[in-house]
Image (cartoon, coloured by chain):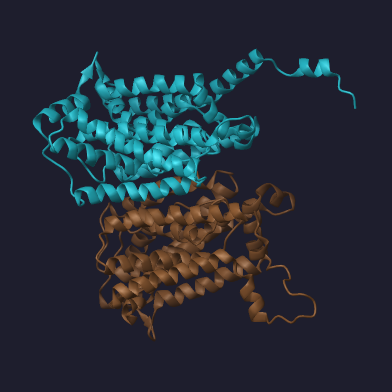
Chain colours: A brown, B cyan
Amino acid sequence: MLRVTEVLGAPETAKPGVEVSWVKKKFLEIPRDLVILFVAFLVMCAIFALLKPQFLNGRNIMNVLRQIAVVFILASGQTFSILSAGIDLSQGAICSLVSVVSADIVIRHGVFWGILAGLGAGTFCGLVTGLFVGLAGIQPFIATMGMIFIASGGALVYTGGIAIFGLDKPQYQGFFFPGGGYLGPIPMPVVIATFFMIGVCYLLYRTPFGRHVYAIGGNERSAIMSGIHAGRTKLFIYVISGFTATVGSLLLTSRILSGQPHLGGFPLLMDSIASVVVGGTSLMGGEGGIFRTLIGAFIIGFLGNGLNLLGVSTFVQQIVIGLIIILSVWASILRSRKA
Amino acid sequence: MSLPSNQRVRGIPGREVMLQKRFAGVHLENFFLLVAFLLMCATYSLLSPAFLTINNILNVLRQSSVLFFLAAGETLALLSAGIDLSQGSIVSLVSVISADMMMRGYGFWMGTLTGLAVGTACGLFTGLWVGKGRLNPFIATLGMSYMASGIALLYTGGDAIFGLPQDCLSIMGWIGEGYLLGIPIPVFLSGIALGLMYLFLNHTRLGRYIYAIGGSEDASNVSGINIPRTKIWVYTLSAFLASIGGSILTSRCISGQPILGGGTLQLESLGSVVIGGTSLFGGEGGILRTLLGVMIISFGINGLNLLATSTYLQDVVVGAIIIFSVWIGILRRREG
C-alpha cells in the first residue's frame, strides 16, 4: 500500500486561519515510527557511550562513518528494488566481480581505465538482471539469485580464485583516494555517500521514475493500468542497484588496495538488505524511503562497532543482528495492526 | 439476467475432467524438463565415457541426497508461498551439536537425535514467528539463519570438531559410504523421504492445506483452514528435513563443522526447487519436480567435473540454468 503521508506529504493538519510554520509542518510529516527508530538509535549510542567512552571518540566515529558509507551506498540501490516489491540478492556478488576486474585493469592499463572497467562490469551485471526482470518477467528473487552464481563465479574464473595484489605502488596512488582519502576531516566515502543520498532523494521524490517505483511496489497491476511502463522502470531499478553495488565495491577495493574475489560475500549483501528492512521499508513494496535506509545503515553500523568495542565476539554479534532484524520487522507489523 | 442453471452446471468440468486436465498439465510441464535433462545426460555421456557408469551414477546420487533433503523442505516452504533461508545454517548447527554430543560419549544415535531435535526446534521457532507473529517468511528465516550460524560458531568457538569416538565413526562410515541392498544408504533414505513426501503432499489434509495456502491465503482462511498452524508445520518440517540432510552430511565428513551449511548449499536447495518449476508465488509444483531439479543440478555439476571444467565456471553454469529454466517456464505459460 502506498503510504500517502510519506510520498505526497501529510494532509493539511492546520485549521484555516492558523499559521503553521513551514518547519513545524515538515516536522509533523515525519512518520511516528521513524522518530521512534531514531530515538532507539540515540538510546543505543548513549548506552555504548556510557559503557565505553571511546565510542564517542572523533576518530572512532569517522571510522564507523566510513564503513557505514559503503553499506549505505549499496543499501540505497537496494531501497529501489525493495520499494518496487522486488529484491536484489546479487549486490554482494557484483562487488566481488567489480573488485577483481577493476584491480586487474588498474594494474594493466592505469587507474582511470580500471575504475571505468569496474563501473562498466558492475553496471552491466545490473543491466542483465534488469533485462531478465523487466523484459522477460522473471521474478527478481530468482533473476538476482542466478546472478549471484554468475557474477561470483565470474569473479573466481577471472582471477582463478586468487586475490590480486600490487595496487600499493606509487603509480596507482590516485586509486587509494576515493576509499581511503580525506576531504578536510571527512573521509571520502562519506562525501560520496552524501552525493548518493542527494541523488537518490531527487530520483525517488522528484522524478516520475521515483513515483513509478512506489506505484509498482504498491500495486503492479494498477500501476500498469494507469499507463506506467513497469518493465522499463524495473530495468532501471536493477541497473541502479547494480551501479550502487559497483560504487560500493570500488570504494572497498580502493581502501584495501587489492582485488578480492570474495570481497562481497553473504555478509555485505545482508548488511545492505538489513539496513533497508530495519529502517522499516516493507518487503511487500510501496512503503518506506531512503531516510529509513539511512537510519537502518546507522543502526547496523554503530551497533557492530559498539559490540566490537565491548569485546563481544563476532559470533554473538551475528545472533544479535538476526534478532534485531526479526524484532524490528515484528514491531512494524504490530504497529500497522494497531493503526 | 436469469441463469440457465442446468446448462451452467453442466458446463463446469466434472471432477474426472479436472483430474485428467491436471494430470495432462503436470505431465507436459515435467515432460519438457525431463527431455532437457535426458539431452544433457546424453551430451555428457558422448563427451565423457565415465559419465554413464554405474559407479559414477551411484556416486552422484549419493552426493545429491543431502541436497534432496534440503530441497524437499524448501519445496514445502515455497508451496505455501513462503521461503526458508535458514536451512544452510541449520545444517551447520546440527553438525556441531551432534558431533559434540558424540564427543561427550553419548553415542551416535543419541548425538544424531539431539542434533535433529535442535534443528527442528529452530524450525519450530521460525514457524511460530511466521505463523503466529505474521512475520514475512523471508525476514523470519533470514534472522534465523544469522542466529543459527552464530550459535553454531559460538558453540565450538569457530573450530571444527574432529576425532570422534571409534564406535560413532564406524556407524557414520556405514551411513556415509555403505550400501543397503546394493543402494547407497543416503540414496535409500532419500528414496523413503521421496515416497513419504509424495503421500504427504497429495494424500493428507495438511499437505493439501499447504497447497491451498500458497494458492490463496485469503480463500483458505475463509474456508476455515488454520493458517498459523499450517505454517508452523511447514517451517518445522522444512527444518526437520534440513536437519536430516545435515546429519547425513556430518556422517559423510565424519566431523562437526560450524560452517558446513555455508557456501552455496542454501542457494542450490532453493535453485533446485525453482528449476523443477515450483512457483515462488506458491500453490504450484510438487516433490517430483523438485527431484528433477535436484537431478539436473547434481548431474549437471558432475558432468562438468568429468569434463574437467573449473569449479568456478560451474557456478556460472548453475546460475544460468536457474534463470533460463524459470524463463522458459514463463514463456510457456504465456503461450498456454
Residue A268 visible in the picture = yes
Residue located at (59% from left, 44% from top)? A137
Q: Is residue A42 left or right of residue A162?
A: right
The outermost residue toward the left is B166
The outermost residue toward the front is A338
B185 in relation to A197, above or below: above
Instruction: Give the percent coordinates (x, y) of residue A338.
Output: 60, 54
The outermost residue toward the right is B1
Which part of the image, by quadrant, shows the N terminus of chain B? top right
Which part of the image, by quadrant, shows the C terminus of chain B? top right
- Of residue A126 and residue A194, the one placed in the foreground of this image is A194
Q: Is residue A194 left or right of residue A84?
A: left
Quadrant in the picture for residue A318 = bottom left
A276 in relation to B120, above or below: below
The outermost residue toward the bottom is A184
A336 in relation to B37, above or below: below
Instruction: Give the percent coordinates (x, y) of residue B19.
Output: 61, 16
Residue B314 visible in the picture = no
Residue located at (34% from left, 50% from top)? B147
Quadrant in the picture for residue A66 = bottom left
Instruction: Give the percent coordinates (x, y) of residue B5.
Output: 83, 18
- Of residue B148 and residue A113, the one placed in the foreground of this image is B148
Instruction: Give the percent coordinates (x, y) of residue B140.
Output: 44, 47
How many numbered marks, from 0 up? 0
